[in-house]
Amino acid sequence: MSSKIMSLEEAAGLVRDGDRISFGGNVLHRAPMAMVRELARQRRKNLRIVKTAGAHDIDLLCAVGCVESVDAGFVSYETEFGLAMHYRKAVEGGRVIGNEHACYTVICALRAAAAGAPFMPVAGLKAGDLLQVADYFRVIQDPFSGEPITVVKAIVPDVAVVHVQEADEQGNAVIYGPKFEDALMSRAARKVIVTTEKIVPRSKIRMRPDLVDIPGFLVSAVVHAPRGAAPCSVEKAYDADWKAIERFKKLKAEEMDIYLQEYELKDRGFKAGGLR
Amino acid sequence: MNMNLMSKGAEPRVCDIMVCAMARLLRDEDRVFHGVSSQMPMVAMMLARHMHAPNLVHLNIPGGVNPASIKKPSYSSAGAELLASGEAYFPLEHVFDLSMRGGLDVAFLGGVQFDVTGNVNASVIGDYHKPKVRLPGGAGSAVLIPTAKRAIIWRTKHDKRTFVEKVDFVTTRGNLWKIVTNLCVFEFKNGSLYLDSIHPTSSLEEVAANTGFPLRYDEIRYTPLPTEREMSLLKQIDPFDYRAKEM
């Protein structure tokens, strides 16, 4: 079996400008920040981001101009850190299209993609202006009952990037703690990049195959990325780094390289004594 | 301050009054969901479980059913801690499915603008395609407010920009039940928002001066102050005072 382990830079090369890209995790938890920062360093263009509820990931990519559109239910930091100002300014300035979803409609759109269906009914989306302004929602007639039902168009990410605690060289990946929508997006996307706190031996994975959330056959690349979600949290590994998030929040869009450089060596796997 | 409504002991703050008002809206055996940036509902649910609703089912984004504790420092209302101290795993997508099939009793949601006819805006100020202000988004609101049996909104800033005659954008409407603010509680009934109770820390004049539509009410009532028991439970349940984070 050939290994799918790649460097962060190589794996980022699987993402093309203009790709529809979904990120795992939720708000400040288990976001794949090492890959997000790499995409930001490479100044990738016109990414179309998909996430139920995002924060730091979406905010950073909007700050450096990598984003064409964001399909999400919620984009904001948690209470203490307030709004995602770079995202907000980018949408208000017309540089980024903010496609508002209910978090659940992102889930339904990914479920449609995972099932190979063109759309998915959303029973609860019954009222409001989103039905008029959003071209990804349509109210159709239920062919069985004749009643109106809202459907959401499938979202097929070109790439899903998911950060996990453990994966083997083939990409069999285990998530501890909340899994959010990560397994779903791995089924919906055309390509899956797994970044992982630890590379574990295949023999360890084979002891408990029932714990594998993402099977390796769906995975294109595995990146060893210790602290790869920082400053967001990873269950059983580290808590959110509130001070780092505070520092980031104080930076202007044109100062993002300060933040990106701070993490560059760590993200790319250099440490004292050479390559990891 | 209406002093004859004051309980003995430490003076309750507005956040204490709000959290207790939210807790009292919950009934035993209710299945209740809160999302992200939702420390106040999280504390209110915990308080209700310790008081009158021991069989309440606490649901959340990370999927921890009935977390035993919410005490961990630097707490997030969407973090892994809620699952780690829970009794079962029931993640967000399953909570949504539950609500779609009519099985969710209460959802706590936010919002930025509300109008007298019960419309909720969490999306934009100005035009949707060219917004003057891009808000964080409704998160689950657009599917939960129509499907949860009772939707409760909380909001710590009650002003004329928040309570308006007509919202800029209707993110959703539906089974809105109560809105708990830093000044009062509104109830949505017969197609209109009614002033339900005024917090004893505020007044009819203050609520009226900060609301962008004429107030409707059946009678003037005050929100009961937290009891000593509620206050002492709050100290145990929420020693790091997450309930004050939004104030």
Image (tube, rainbow, N blue to C red):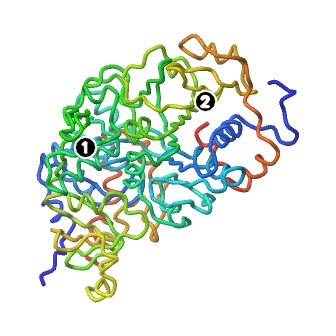
Give the structural element (helix, strand or loop) at label 2. strand
Query: What x and y, as percent, mark residue B59?
Result: 50, 54
Residue at the farthest front position: A145
Callout 1, which amino acid?
Answer: Pro
Measured in 3D between alpha carbons, the distance from the residue under mark 2 to the one under mark 1, in whole angstroms, is 34 Å
Percent of width and height locating residue A176? 40, 70
Amino acid type at image mark 2: Thr
Chain letter behind tag 2:
B
Q: Which residue is mark 1?
A: A121
In the drawing, does residue A181 fall left or right of residue B160?
A: left
- Helix, strand or loop at mark 1: strand
Visible residue check, residue A143: yes
Residue at 25% x, 25% y: name it. Answer: A132
Observer-nearest of B14 and A15: B14
Work out whether A42 lies above or below B153: below
| Label of residue B162 in the image | none
Category of crowding for the residue at label 2, using alpha-carbon neighbours closer than 10 angstroms: few (below 14), some (14–19), many (at least 20): many
Tell me, yes or no, whether dots 2 and 1 are on the same chain.
no
Q: In the rendering, which numbered label is found on residue B181?
A: 2
**Front of the two marks 2 and 1:** 1
**Mark 1 residue crowding within 10 angstroms, few (<14) / some (14–19) / many (20+):** many
Question: Relative to A163, is B150 on the left or the right?
Answer: right
Please indicate, yes or no, whether residue A33 appears anywhere in the rendered image: no
Image side of residue A53 versus residue B241, left or right:
left
